[in-house]
Image: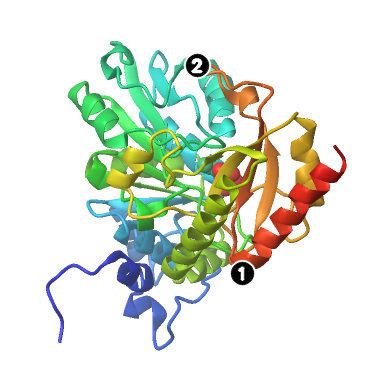
Amino acid sequence: MSSKRPHKIATRVVTGGRKKEHTGSVVNVPVWRASTHLYEDVASLEAGKKSNSDGRFFYGRRGSPTQWALADALTAMEPGAAGTMLYPSGVAAISCALLSVLRPGDVLLMTDNVYDPSRSFADGFLKRFGVETRYFDPMTTDYSRLFCDKTRAILLEAPGSLTFEVQDVSAICAEAKKRGVVTLLDNTWATPYFFTALDKGVDITILAATKYIVGHSDVMLGSVTTHEKYWTRLRQTTQQLGQVVSPDDAYLAARGLRTLAVRMDAHEVSALTIAKWLQTRPDVEVVLHPALPECPGHAIWARDFTGSSGLFSFVLKGNKAKAAEFVDALDLFGIGYSWGGFESLALPVHPETCRSEVPWDIERSVIRLQIGLEDPDDLIADLDSAFRAIKAVD
Ligand SMILES: Cc1ncc(COP(=O)(O)O)c(C=O)c1O
């Protein structure tokens, strides 16, 4: 018996992209490794060229059922989406999404707390391409001052990298729409599980799928999902730039995706437990976690998000050297880039090196934590011993 009610997101995470014609009698879409797809005859080869459609064999660069299944599953998570393109990293997804909408002479707006490599792409490649990038305070409400006649697109990130301010995505998108400005969002922190972007007014939503979608710290991958208006040019730009993801990576990502809901729920509970424990510490100045009232933009998070993931920062009291000492004293937390996997990580981070509109006080020592799926009691014990270790060297 089937109901007409649309399925909830945890169900779509499990069912999305699993078409019988691709899975056959097994649960997961198998790995189809292919560059050449063989045709019955020249007429069918010519027909394939003409139709240029997704989800049909053509040539390896257009993918195979393994990549199509993952793309379809990600599309199913965003109500109103026309399709999803896949990329070999989150950075490739961000740069290709921007290139699909920008032309020389345009002005691009970027939130000041954007992921630093997005800033590098704008200040390096896009500048040479003739696009000027202007950064803005993520917490501004004076939206009318942001735009000019040449503003073509705006890249948002909520919460922002390293410092986690939550900007008002819906309000900014509404202003952008009035002016015909395209809105793009790096939605890696929340994923559509905690924040569906297109129904908040975002035109193009981007994931570093390397993080929570893959979830196991073993694949680099990016995705871009959009509605009908920008779909054709996103697809064309992606194809023209020769972007393609290996079927093995797509398989691992699809496999990771199926457990996204339970992982995100567990990341949320553990990260909040630890963030609240950190708030009680006399050696912590502030905890920057969107679900805590002291985080800038908390009220916006409470209004628009259905949950919080496992990544947040805290500011340690004392001088900068303390952050490195603290991280070195941890045992269960790994020291390494990335996040969104099952294991916990800690890093001293330096927002002062990647802010231009809202300068960050260089003296404040910030530690970013990725809370994995270990028992939070063990993680708290590890943090506690690191606090004791830095006290011991005072
Ligand atoms: C917010 C955010 N966006 C994008 C990326 C880039 O993803 P990738 O490392 O897959 O290129 C990262 C990576 O850390 C990130 O933190």
Left or right: 297 with respect to 315?
left
Q: Which residue lies furthest to the right in this view?
A: 393
Of 241 and 151, which appears nearest the observer?
151
Q: Can you identify the residue that label 1 sits on?
A: 375
Does 145 appear above or below 286?
above
Q: Position of residue 353 (x, y in %)?
A: 65, 24
Indicate how the structure is coloured in the image: rainbow
User: What residue do we see at 86% from left, 45% from top?
Assistant: 392
Does 342 appear above or below 369?
below
User: What residue do we see at 47% from left, 67% from top?
Assistant: 254
**Does ligand 1 reach within 8 Å of label 1's beta carbon?**
no
User: What residue do we see at 34% from left, 65% from top?
Assistant: 44
Is the N terminus in the top left, top right, bottom left or bottom right quadrant?
bottom left
- Of helix, strand and loop, which one carries label 1? loop
Ligand 1 location (quadrant): top right
Query: Could you tell me how far apart the alpha carbons at marks 2 and 1 are, in whole angstroms?
Result: 39 Å
Question: CB atoms at circles 2 and 1 under 8 Å apart?
Answer: no
Is the C terminus in the top left, top right, bottom left or bottom right quadrant?
top right
**Can you tell which quarter of the image residue 354 is in?**
top right
Q: Which residue lies furthest to the left in this view?
A: 4
Q: Position of residue 170 (x, y in %)?
A: 26, 36
Q: Position of residue 172 (x, y in %)?
A: 28, 28
Q: Can you identify the residue that label 2 sits on?
A: 357
